[in-house]
Image: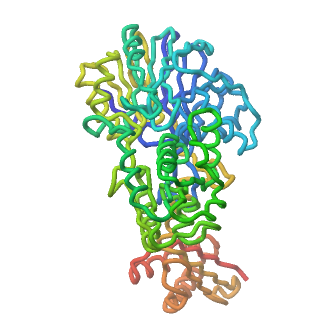
Amino acid sequence: MSHPHPELTAPPALPDHGLRVIPLGGLGEVGRNMTVFEYGGKLLIVDAGVLFPEDHHPGVDLILPDFGPIRDRLDDVVALVLTHGHEDHIGAVPYLLRERPDIPLVGSALTLALLRSKLQEHRLKETVHYPVKEGETLDMGPFGLEFVAVNHSIPDALAVAIRTGAGMVLHTGDFKMDQLPLDGRITDLRSFARLGEEGVDLFLTDSTNAETPGFTALEKQITPVIDQVFRESDQRIIVACFASHIHRVQQILNAAAAHGRKVGYVGRSMVRNMHIASDLGYLDVPPGVMVEAKELAKLPPEKQVLVSTGSQGEPMSALSRIAQRNHNFVHIEPGDTVLMASSLIPGNENAVYRVINGLSRLGARVVHKGNALVHVSGHASAGELLYCYNIVKPRNVLPVHGEIRHMLANADLARATGVENVVVAEDGVVVDLVDGVASIVGKVECGYVFVDGSSVGDVTESDLKDRRILGEEGFVSIIVVVDSVSGKVSAGPEIHARGNILDDQTFEEIRQPIIDALDRALADGNTDSYQLQQVVRRTVGRWVSGKHRRRPMIIPVVVEA
């Protein structure tokens, strides 16, 4: 088994008969999935998603894959294939299309519809779309594509088989093997087996749940739990889930109809996505159940159901604003029930529990994954992955979509079924398939690209470090005027402290040491303003660290008069 290695160098030229795989996101993290395939001088991209920021990314809105390794070859891209409509697979598409607007987009009807509304938000013109269904084939340049139905936590998800002269790749996308799905659309293991008989040279498999033994629970197991919540609630019910979780919303609509309640959507993305799903026939809305959210308030509380965004504690989401009592028309009353019907994305735990505590403080009963079966994963657990390896019998395996621990667990499963060549890579690690053997051949520069407001890529890791210091330790500014003629401090220092760093008065005792240090430096003939600023920074830094155990950002300004 191969492991990524930090000393890997740039990859050599791709052999004429070889296929190159370059993961630009999704290997080493749960999110921003993007993989580039190169064959015959052309590129095929599968997915272009975003990663959502965590607490150590202050001020960051989204994290994109790094397009740098292919930026000068975007004209060679024959298509962008989208496996399904989740943000971690389509969220970066608008940013990629800013760099080349006419990349052909391939995906299922629902996936392309969700993407189309996203492109409109970004004010991007319509590009060429190729809507596809399971069982269909499509040739894009030297890549022959075949699409296979897979079951996931959003309808219309697809795996894709990629045929090239170097061999066949099967990319699962995100998938699980729910045998009783709400929409009746199961993962097509017959097609997996048929492709296996043809010969899968490289199998890219979803690793997210590879550490979880057994099989992922069925979506239908949640239905009785939702029904019980409706049965036991005698006031308003607020349901928070992902804006793309059409199956879960279907269960809520069915329960509302059964219990004589009306439903309203709250949150722009929820309203948009559910209207798209309903228009395309992926969401079956019972007659008379839907009303506008603002009209819902006119009904008795026991007749109301609100379906909201914000299940991950996002600060600006509808549920977070409700929990903070600053939503414009939804206000929690004691006795309301809030059903948080989603899993916790790693890194969001604190934000979610903050929302739960806020809702509980206002008198709501909060039902969540910690106290009820209100969500099941959308990803295959270890037992399902073993089935897939035994059915497909791939020659080589490249685990994708997960943190390193997930991919290593997935690799162990593949090896346990007899797969001899399992390659564990990370973002930027280049894998070539040559003569039926996959191997790591090098690495390309591939980092995080941060979106901050309208700025894309301008924020660096150094900027984030500064922001973390500002947020955790505060900052101190010191302004000093020195007389270049007398070589003495003539005014100041004027000291201002902000943030988690006590207050201005705390710094009174450091004033004289700053003056003394500057006077000594000036007496030694040091008149360079940058050097004098460093003297101030060192003096204040040593003092505040020694006395107060703090490491604030120190901003000295030395002015010559």
Q: Is residue 206 left or right of residue 516?
A: left
**Spot occupied by residue 318 in the image (x, y as percentages of width and height):** 57, 60
Camera-nearest residue between 180 and 147: 180
Camera-nearest residue between 385 and 2: 385
Residue 424 found in image quarter: top left
Q: Residue at x 35, y 17 (%)?
A: 392
Camera-nearest residue between 400 and 255: 255
Q: Quadrant of the C terminus?
A: bottom right
Residue 71 found in image quarter: top right
Regarding residue 77, the answer to whether it shows in the image is no
**Spot occupied by residue 529 in the image (x, y as percentages of width and height):** 64, 73
Eyeballing the image, is 269 above or below 126?
below
Q: Is residue 407 left or right of residue 513?
A: left
Q: Residue at x 37, y 14 (%)?
A: 193
Camera-nearest residue between 418 and 115: 115
**Spot occupied by residue 454 in the image (x, y as percentages of width and height):** 69, 52
Count of all numbered marks drawn on residues in the image: 0
Display coloring:
rainbow
Q: Is residue 241 left or right of residue 208?
A: right
Eyeballing the image, is 393 above or below 5?
above
Q: Residue at x 66, y 89 (%)?
A: 491
Q: Quadrant of the N terminus?
A: top left
Q: Residue at x 41, y 50 (%)?
A: 226
Residue 104 found in image quarter: top right
Regarding residue 226, the answer to whether it shows in the image is yes
